[in-house]
Every structure is written in C-alpha cells, then in structure tokens.
Image (tube, grey):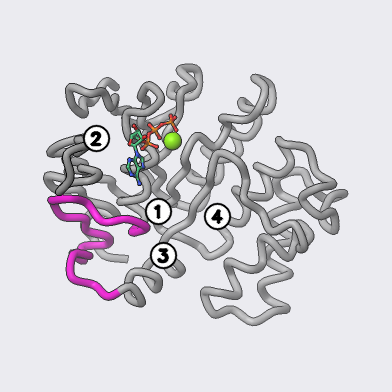
Amino acid sequence: MSKGFVLELKGISKIYNESSSDKLVIFKNINLNIKKSELIGIIAPSGTGKTSLLNICGLLDLPSCGEVRILNKNTKSLTIEMRNNIRKKYLGFVFQSSNLINEFNAIENVALSRIIKGYNFPDALDYAKKLLINVGLKNRLYNRPLQLSGGEKQRVAICRAIANDPYLLLADEPTGNLDNENSQLVFKLLTDLVKRKNVSALVATHNLDLIKKMDRVFCLTKNGFKEVK
Ligand SMILES: Nc1ncnc2c1ncn2[C@@H]1O[C@H](COP(=O)(O)OP(=O)(O)OP(=O)(O)O)[C@@H](O)[C@H]1O
Ligand SMILES: [Mg+2]
C-alpha cells in the first residue's frame, strides 16, 4: 500500500447539463484527503449532492472539473476498463437499498465481489461464509435477499463491500432504510469492520447520531463543503 492518501479530491466540481439552459451546479471546488483507516462522514440535506460526490469518488461518474486521485494515482485520463479495474480491486460500495442479486443467496452475493477480483470459487465462498458468520448471519447463509429483513440485507451488503479487501469503502446512506435499532447495529458493524480491517471509509448519512463515531465529518451544503468535526 502506498504511503500517501487513499483518496484525494482536488478542486472537484459537479455541474449537470453543463451546456444547456437548465445547467445545474451541484457543488464547486471540493477538496478532501482520506488517509488509511480513516472514517469520514458526509452529512448533508437531501438533494445537495452526496450521491453525486460518492459516484465521482467511486469512479462511476466524472467530475466537471478537478482531480480524483486513488492510491496516489490520478484517475483523470484512465479508460473505462482501467476505472473498472480500480473499482474491483480497491473499492467497496454500500448503497442505501442493498442492491443484492435476488437470484443469489447471501454467501453467493458476498463471494461474487471476491471472485470478480480474481480469487477462486472455493476461497471466495469460504471467505464470504466467515464474513457473514462474523456479522451474526450464521443462520441466514443460504437465504436469498427476498428471504432476509432490511437490516440483514444491509449486513450482507456490507460483507459484499469488503469481500474484495478494498482500501476504500464508499457508503451512500447505508442505514437510510432502517429503523433506529437496526441503523445502530449496521453502523456499528460497518465502523468495527473498517477499524479491524484497516479500510478507509467515506459514509454519507442524514443520521446525526451516526456521525459520533467518525474520525472527521464534513457538511455539504449549497454554500460549500466544510469540516464540522
Ligand atoms: N444525472 C443527473 N442529471 C441531472 N441532475 C442530476 C443527476 N443526478 C442528480 N441530479 C440532481 O443533482 C442534485 C443532487 O443529487 P444527489 O442524488 O447527488 O443528492 P443527494 O444529496 O444524494 O440526495 P439524497 O439525500 O436525496 O439522496 C439533485 O438536485 C438531483 O436532482
Ligand atoms: Mg443520495
């Protein structure tokens, strides 16, 4: 692992419909550095651009201007294939609604991200099983997503996000669809895993309670991007 930052944003702006009359400036000039094992929160009102920013960090979208560096590498002029490679090797995603594959059971959903990274089937299945047991899903290993509760699905989604041993976990309102008790549980799991596995994480949330455990917190508003903790 390189010595520098896991993720660096330098002067990132996002403008939708840039060349038309309904041009929409979402944010401007965001700067952020994330170190190894750091847990960073982004708290912001709905519609201010959390998902847009996470998509840029995860190389799912391009900024209108500015530079995204992952593990000291500028991603600006990479081909789609190179960006996909960075994602499968170094990044993990947790979405608001778990986005699991309904035809696969819990183990298969988790194992898939490890298989895509290049591990063989038996290794990936074994690793997935251990991760799921670790988050209390020993009796749900062979359930498909439709046979799991919302909180259980999010726990599977977190296991999937870390099954490829990522350097950076990007979580977009990972507890957004859960009640308070399940939010606390899922969030604790996420933070424990991040610390135990030395992963860095960038977590967008509306939930003010959840930011207490973050190392640093930024607030994204129409007026800018400010460190608030
Ligand atoms: N592809 C797109 N084209 C045009 N506008 C978009 C696009 N994606 C998002 N937007 C707009 O950009 C703004 C920010 O959206 P975004 O989804 O990033 O916000 P958010 O902070 O994640 O909101 P929420 O908390 O509701 O998830 C919104 O006004 C949205 O309508
Ligand atoms: Mg969003």
Which mark is first along the chain, 1 or 4?
Answer: 4
What element does badge 4 sit on? helix
Which marked residue is nearer to the observer: mark 4 or mark 2?
2
Amino acid on which the number 1 mark rests in the picture: Leu
Kindly identify the residue that appears in the image at 21 percent across and 58 percent down: 69
Q: CA distance from mark 2 to mark 1?
A: 24 Å
Question: Which numbered circle lies on residue 168?
Answer: 1
Residue 189 counted in the magenta span: no
Q: Secondary structure at mark 3?
A: helix
The crowd level at tag 3 (other Cα within 10 Å; few <14, some 14-19, many 20+) is some
Q: Residues within 10 Å of mark 1 (few under 14, many from 20)?
A: many
**What's the CA distance linking mark 4 and mark 2?**
27 Å
Which mark lies nearer to you, 2 or 1?
Answer: 2
Instruction: Indicate the quadrant of ligand 1 in the picture.
Output: top left
Residues at marks 3 and 4 touching, judged by CB atoms closer than 8 Å: no
Say which label, 2 or 1, has the lower sequence index.
2
Q: Earlier in the sequence, mark 2 or mark 3?
A: 2
Q: Earlier in the sequence, mark 3 or mark 1?
A: 3
Q: Which residue is mark 4?
A: 161
Residue 73 included in the magenta stretch of the image = yes
Label 2, label 3: how far apart the Cα atoms are: 24 Å
At mark 1, the secondary structure is strand
In the picture of the structure, the residue carrying the numbered disc 3 is 87
